[in-house]
Amino acid sequence: MKIAVATNENGFLEDKVASHFGRAKSFLIYNTETKDFEIHLNPEVTGKTEFPPDFLYRQKVEVVIVFGLGYMAYKKFENYNIKMYKADKRTIAENLQKFEDNKLKELTEKDMF
């Protein structure tokens, strides 16, 4: 399974989760089977017209861990059947561990901004 987490830092598991998903510098995509990860620049921030949910869908992401989402991003992920989970204030690695331990809550429409 591939899990995407937005970050504004260097692209390591010890980075913090970006507070604003759509404006994050990059996305760390973690593969739960291989325990490897890749860093991809956010296409919207680099000037491309591709919306982050569309980009992550093309990368075959199945889960995103975020603090919150805008309405359009939330609906796109919902339409793509990409599960959304609420991040806490810890590192990407800690959020991934909490996800694997089933300790993250699914994002709801209340978490949209």
Image: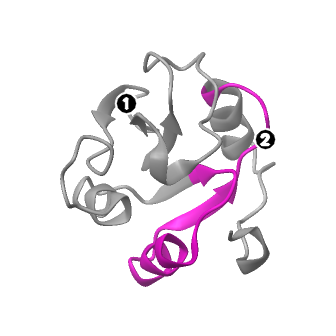
Tell me if residue 31 is in the magenta stretch.
Answer: no
Task: Name which quarter of the figure residue 57 lies in.
Answer: bottom left
Task: Name which quarter of the figure residue 11 lies in.
Answer: top left
**Which residue in the protein does label 1 denote?**
34
Q: Can you say whether 1 is above or below 105 in the image?
A: above
Q: Position of residue 5 (x, y in %)?
A: 51, 41
Q: Which amino acid does label 1 sit on?
A: Thr
Q: Position of residue 65 (x, y in %)?
A: 60, 50
Which of the labelled discs sits on residue 63, or is there none?
none
Measuring 43% from the left and 27% from the top, which residue is drawn there? 35
Number of marks in the rendered image:
2
Measuring 61% from the left and 29% from the top, which residue is drawn there? 92
Work out whether mark 2 precedes mark 1 in sequence or the reverse, and give the earlier one. 1
Measuring 29% from the left and 35% from the top, which residue is drawn there? 40
Q: Position of residue 37 (x, y in %)?
A: 37, 28
Task: Give the camera-side residue of 42 and 105.
Answer: 42
Q: Can you say whether 17 is above or below 108 in the image?
A: above
Task: Name which quarter of the figure residue 74 lies in.
Answer: bottom right
**Which residue in the protein does label 2 denote?**
88
Specify the segment rendered in magenta: 65-92
Q: Which amino acid does label 2 sit on?
A: Asp
Task: Give the camera-side residue of 76 and 84.
Answer: 76
Q: Quadrant of the C terminus?
A: bottom right
Tell me if residue 77 is in the magenta stretch.
Answer: yes
Q: Gap between marks 2 and 1, in whole Å?
A: 24 Å
Q: Can you say whether 9 is above or below 101 in the image?
A: above
Task: Give the camera-side residue of 28 and 71.
Answer: 71
- Numbered disc in front, either 2 or 1: 2
Q: Where is residue 73 in the image (x, y as percent from the top left)?
A: 48, 70
Task: Give the camera-side residue of 70 and 100.
Answer: 70
Which residue appears farthest toward the front when viewing the image? 47
Q: Can you say whether 72 is above or below 94 in the image?
A: below
